[in-house]
């Protein structure tokens, strides 16, 4: 009997009249949730939430196992199609492959897109190359979606590099739980770059030669444009536009940050200047060629001085761009080829990172990182608001939001008292970086939060589940497969932070802290 029957379901004894395949019916019985509160009056809402969440977890595991069976079936069909093609006599000048025939066959039978089927076949027909991935899929430890993402992003790597890489990417988070979607993606990109730094560098140079700009019109009279450029230049543009948008909002501009980012970038490209904050706040809308008195408007269209027409400022008046990259000492000195992070944006190869930090005008700033915990120094104040030095230090140590499963960069987070002030003092051991969403959830008591393991934060949900988060491990990339030999002794890593005691206000600009 086939594992999946795509024909009309027929009730039978094993499926209790449901018409489901017997194996699937058994899976559903095994994962069935216990009776709800109405059937068990003494059951609390906490117990009910935990039971339903447990059911979801069991179903996800069984779904992964079913997906593994699907991959096995793909492999079996591919073998049959391969044998059929070998027996055929054809005069076609372009011979078809078993991959093409099987992909079309499966797509027609199931409705799954040909491209998706091709990715699944790539996994199904490489049992040795992806043996770790296939084993995890059969055990219910990884979804087919994540498995295929690994398959696609590791195509250029040798077979021998994959077992260790796949094990590292699929390893649990520090608290033993399943890694979040964003953390999984970051691990995968970082490990791929560390596994083949020379090949990645060659591909980066080739891609740099293909840099371009293109755009298209979309619905509702709008349009989009894409700039393909080196990563550090894109990050610099994003950082500068973000700073300008936030400055305009702080000056009273009524537009949202998204609207400001769009308007300011277009103004800079079209005119080379932007409207000043006061005129933007009055206008409340995008500037452009039709704006009287603006660079794109007709000569003499602006009103006389003092009538409230918008004024314009040059790019030199805008906040400077900062490109922040975390480069461990071992990478900077060539002792390791671990991937390095453009904080909040993604990962680059070690050669690319060394090129960035040695570019003219680069500024290096150091934060000594505890190899084991990354614990902050004892900085405190009697006030509610932490000092700028404390905020900068906490964000550098945490790296990302300390909420469960959240990977929002700390630079975009609030700094929150774990134990509310004044009961909890304002010092770095009681301060953590939280995204606005996680901060609001903590304030609303959707999560119960407490400190554990000195540098860990325990988050308990309404369903009673506990998740523990820790500060960012700035040296994690040094332990990735293929990152190169480790240093002979522990050295401090270079992070995105100024040393404690150096005020942000003591410098004319905030330089890129490489």
Image (cartoon, rainbow, N blue to C red):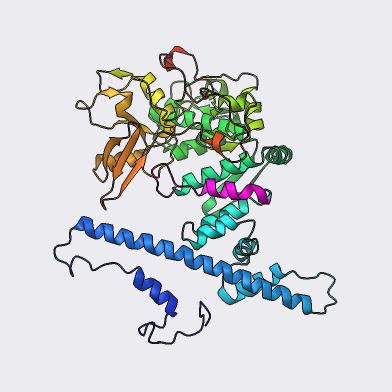
Say which of 467 and 365 sits in front. 467
Image quarter of the C terminus: top right
Q: Residue at x 42, y 33 (%)?
A: 410
**Percent from the top left, x then y, of residue 492?**
51, 22
Q: Residue at x 33, y 24 (%)?
A: 428
Say which of 454 and 153 sits in front. 454
**Percent from the top left, x then y, of residue 354?**
64, 27
Indicate yes or no whether the magenta region holds residue 165.
Answer: yes
Q: Residue at x 31, y 22 (%)?
A: 386
**Percent from the top left, x then y, of residue 480?**
56, 39
Residue 123 sits in quarter: bottom right
Say which of 370 and 340 sits in front. 370
Indicate yes or no whether the magenta region holds residue 378.
Answer: no
Q: Find the residue positioned furthest to the top.
A: 506
Report the span colored magenta. Answer: 159-178
Q: Say if 370 sits above or below 72 in the image.
A: above
Residue 130 sits in quarter: bottom right
Evaluate whether residue 6 shows in this view.
yes
Q: Say if 256 sits above or below 129 in the image.
A: above
Q: Say if 66 sits above or below 506 in the image.
A: below
């Amino acid at each position: 009997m086939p594992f999946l029957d795509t024909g009309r379901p027929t009730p039978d004894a094993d499926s209790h009249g449901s018409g489901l395949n017997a194996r699937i019916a058994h899976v559903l019985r095994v994962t069935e949730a216990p009776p709800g509160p109405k059937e068990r009056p003494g059951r609390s809402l906490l117990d009910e939430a935990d039971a339903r969440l447990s059911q979801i977890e069991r179903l996800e595991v069984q779904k992964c196992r079913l997906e593994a069976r699907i991959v096995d079936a793909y492999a079996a069909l591919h073998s049959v199609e391969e044998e059929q093609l070998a027996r055929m006599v054809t005069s076609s000048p372009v011979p078809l492959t078993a991959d093409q025939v099987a992909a079309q066959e499966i797509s027609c039978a199931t409705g799954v897109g040909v491209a998706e089927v091709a990715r699944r076949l790539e996994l199904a027909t490489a049992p040795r190359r992806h043996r770790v991935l296939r084993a995890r899929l059969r055990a219910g430890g990884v979804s087919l979606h994540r498995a295929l993402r690994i398959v696609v992003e590791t195509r250029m790597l040798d077979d021998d590099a994959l077992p260790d890489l796949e094990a590292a990417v699929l390893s649990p988070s520090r608290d033993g739980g399943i890694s979040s979607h964003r953390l999984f993606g970051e691990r995968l990109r970082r490990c791929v770059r560390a596994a083949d730094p020379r090949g990645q560098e060659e591909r980066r140079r080739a891609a740099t030669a293909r840099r371009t700009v293109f755009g298209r019109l979309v619905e509702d009279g709008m349009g989009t444009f894409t700039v393909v450029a080196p990563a550090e230049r894109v990050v610099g543009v994003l950082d500068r536009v973000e700073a300008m948008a936030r400055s305009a909002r702080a000056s009273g501009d009524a537009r949202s940050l998204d609207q400001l980012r769009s308007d300011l970038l277009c103004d800079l490209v079209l005119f080379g200047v932007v409207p000043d904050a006061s005129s933007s706040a009055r206008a409340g809308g995008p500037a452009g060629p039709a704006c009287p008195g603006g660079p794109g408007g007709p000569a003499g269209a602006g009103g006389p001085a003092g009538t409230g027409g918008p004024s314009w400022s040059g790019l030199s008046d805008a906040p400077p761009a900062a490109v922040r990259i975390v480069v461990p000492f071992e990478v900077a000195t060539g002792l390791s080829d671990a991937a390095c992070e453009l904080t909040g944006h993604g990962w680059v190869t070690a050669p690319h990172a060394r090129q960035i930090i040695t570019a003219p005008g680069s500024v290096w700033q150091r934060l000594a990182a505890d190899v084991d915990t990354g614990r902050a120094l004892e900085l405190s104040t009697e006030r509610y608001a932490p000092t700028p030095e404390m905020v900068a230090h906490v964000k550098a140590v945490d790296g990302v939001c300390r909420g469960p499963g959240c990977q929002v960069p700390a630079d975009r987070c609030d700094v929150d008292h774990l134990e509310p002030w004044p009961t909890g003092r304002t010092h770095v051991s009681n301060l953590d970086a939280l995204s606005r969403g996680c901060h609001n959830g903590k304030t609303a008591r959707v999560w119960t939060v407490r400190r554990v393991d000195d540098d860990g934060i325990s988050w308990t949900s309404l369903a009673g589940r506990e998740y523990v988060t820790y500060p960012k491990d700035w040296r994690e990339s040094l332990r990735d497969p293929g990152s190169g030999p480790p240093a002979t002794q522990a050295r401090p890593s270079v992070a995105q932070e100024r040393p404690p005691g150096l005020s942000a206000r003591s410098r004319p600009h905030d330089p890129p802290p490489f």
